[in-house]
Amino acid sequence: MSAANKEIGPPVIELGVMGWLRKNLFSNWYNSLLTIFGLYLLYILIPPLVNWIFLDANFVGSTRDDCTNEGACWIFIQQNIKLIFYGLYPTEELWRINFVYLILFISGVYLLIPNLKHKGWVGAFLLIIFPIICVVMLSGGLGLEAVETRLWGGLFLTLVIAGVGIVLSLPIGVMLALGRRSKLPVVSILCTIFIEIWRGVPLITVLFMASNMFPLFMPEGVNFDKLIRALIGVMFFSAAYLAEVVRGGLQAMPKGQYEASQAVGLTYWRMMALVILPQSLKMVIPAIIGSFIAIFKDTTLVLVIGLFDFLGIIQFVGTNPDWLGFSHEGYVFAAAVFWVFCYGMSWYSQRLEKKLDTGR
Amino acid sequence: MSELMIEMKNVHKWFGELHVLNDINLEINKGEKIVICGPSGSGKSTLIRCINRLEEHQRGNIIVEGTELTNDSRSIERIRGEVGMVFQQFNLFPHLSILDNCSLAPIWVRKLPKAEAKQKAMEYLKRVQIDDQAHKYPAQLSGGQQQRAAIARALCMEPRIMLFDEPTSALDPEMIKEVLDVMVGLAQGGMTMIVVTHEMGFAKEVADSIIFMDEGQIVEAKNPKDFFDNPESERTKTFLSQIL
C-alpha cells in the first residue's frame, strides 16, 4: 500500500451521527418515509402509555375510591399483592416461600458472577439438595405445618410448575432424543411413540386428562395430589418437545466427532456425555430456551383444572366486587411480570451462547 | 523375532451391493510401517477403519494383538485402546481446548488422575511442537497444527499401533511437511503404523512395504524400491504414472 493511500480515510459522509442517520434511516426515499412513519407511530403511542402507566397513575391509597387520577390504578395490584404472589398460602407461613426464594436468589447470583470457585458444588446443591428443601419447606414436614397444595397459587404456583417442568423436562428430553436415535429398535420405537403421542396432544387436553381422567384409572383410595398430576403432565409435554429439539442438535453433529470419540476408546455414554451432547446442546440453546419460554407461558393453562396460577389469580381478584373494572391494570401487570421472566431467560441464553462459544 | 500385531484373514465387506473389501489378507508385525495407496473408492480407508471397528467386516477374521474383533464390546474396547487413529479432517473436539482434547480419553478411559493426564498430554504436545498452543481451542489453530494436535491426542492413549487415514489430504501444501515430519519422527521411534496416503516421498522414506489397492483388492504389496521400480500389475503402473 502506498503512503498516499494510507491517508485516505473513509468518506466523511459515512462518519459520525449524521453519517449513521443517513446510512440507516434516510438512505433513499422509501426508507425516509418509513422512518418518518415510525417516528409518528411512536409519537402517538408512547406519550399516552407513559401517562397512563406512570404520570397519571394512582400509587397511594387503599381502596378504589383513592384512584382519582385518570391513569392506571396500581392500588388494585398493591392491595391484592399477597394473593397475586402467593395465592391462599397461610400468611404466617409465607416466610417459608420467601426463604426458598432467598436461597434460589443467592445461589443464582453466585452462579452468574464470573470466575467464582466451587460453582459445580453450588450447581449440584441447586439440583439435588435444593429440591428437597423446597418440598419440605413448601408443603410441610420435619415439624413444619403442612400446607395443602390447593392453597398454593399466584406467581409462586407459576414458578413451581414452570420450574419443575423446565428442570425435569430437559434430562428426560435428552434421554428421549438419544433413545429415538438408538440402534436398538425397541428403544427407538418406544421413544418415538412416546414423543409423538405427547406432541400430538394439546397441553390443555393433557391437563384435563391428568385432572379428570387419571383418577378413574386409579384404584379406589389411591389419590395423587392434583398439582403433582399437573406437574407430571407439563413435564412430559415439555420433554417431548425438547426431545425433538435435542434430536435436531444430535443430527447436526458431524460423523467425525462420533468416530474420533470411538477411536480414542470412549464408550457410548461417555462419548455422549463428554463429546456429543456438550456440542449439540450448545448448538440448540436458542431452541431449548424457546421451549422453556413457551412452557413458562403455557403454565397459565392450569387454570382450566382449577389451579390458580399467576394470571388466573389476577383474573380472579379482578372479579372481586370491590375491584371490578380494573382488569386492564391486572393484565398489564401480568404481561410485565411474564415479560421480565421470559426476557430474563432469553438474556441468559444469549450470555450462555457467548460464554460457550469456542469457534468452529 | 518379529511379533505379529495385526492379522487379517480373508476379510470381506460390502456396502449394500458394492464389494468394498474383497478377500483381504494381511499380516503386520511389530514396528512395521505400511503405506496403503490406490485410487479413490478402492477400499483403502475402509480397510484401516475395520482395524479399530469404525467399520464392521462381514466375512473373515481380523486379529489385533491376539484379540479377535467380534461384536463383543469388550474386545472392541480393548482393541480401540491399543490402536490410535488420525483422520483426514482431524476431528478434534471443538468444544475442548487442545490440552483437554488430549487428556480426555486418558482420564475417562485409562482412568489416569487429571494432573498426570494433563502432564502427559503436555509431553506429547511438546513432541509435536505445539505445546505453546495447549490452551487454545481447535478453531484457533491452523490445519497443520490441528493435525499435529490430533496425532498428540491419539498418542496420549499410548497406543501400540497407529492408523493414519489420509492425514495430509485436507491440508494446505505448506503445512503438509510439518505433519509428515511428526509422522517420520514417530516411525523412527519404532511405532507400528498403517498409513493411507498419496505422499509417495513419505512412503519411500519410511515404509517397509507399500500396498496398492484397487476395487477392494490388494493388487500389489512390495517394499518401496521394488514397488516404484518394478511394479508388476498394469493397474499399479497406470496409478503410479498418474501420481508421480
Image: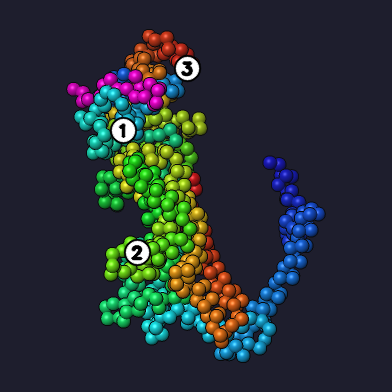
Asked if badge 3 and badge 2 are on a common chain, one would say: no
Instruction: Please say if A16 is above or below A176.
Output: below
- Nearest to the observer: residue B129 or residue B157: B157
**Residue type marked 1:** Asn
- Nearest to the observer: residue B140 or residue B86: B86
Residue corresponding to mark 1: B52
Residue A351 percent location from the top left of the image: 50, 60
**Residue type marked 3:** Leu
Tell me the crowding category of disc 2: few under 14, some 14 to 19, or many 20 or more residues within 10 angstroms, Cα based: few
Residue corresponding to mark 2: A216
Q: Is residue B44 visible?
A: no
Q: Single out the residue that lies furthest toward the left.
A: B1
Residue corresponding to mark 3: B244
Is residue A296 located in the magenta-colored stretch of the structure?
A: no
Give the SS element for disc 3. loop
Numbered range of the magenta stretch: B1-22
**Residue type marked 2:** Leu
Chain ID, mark 1: B
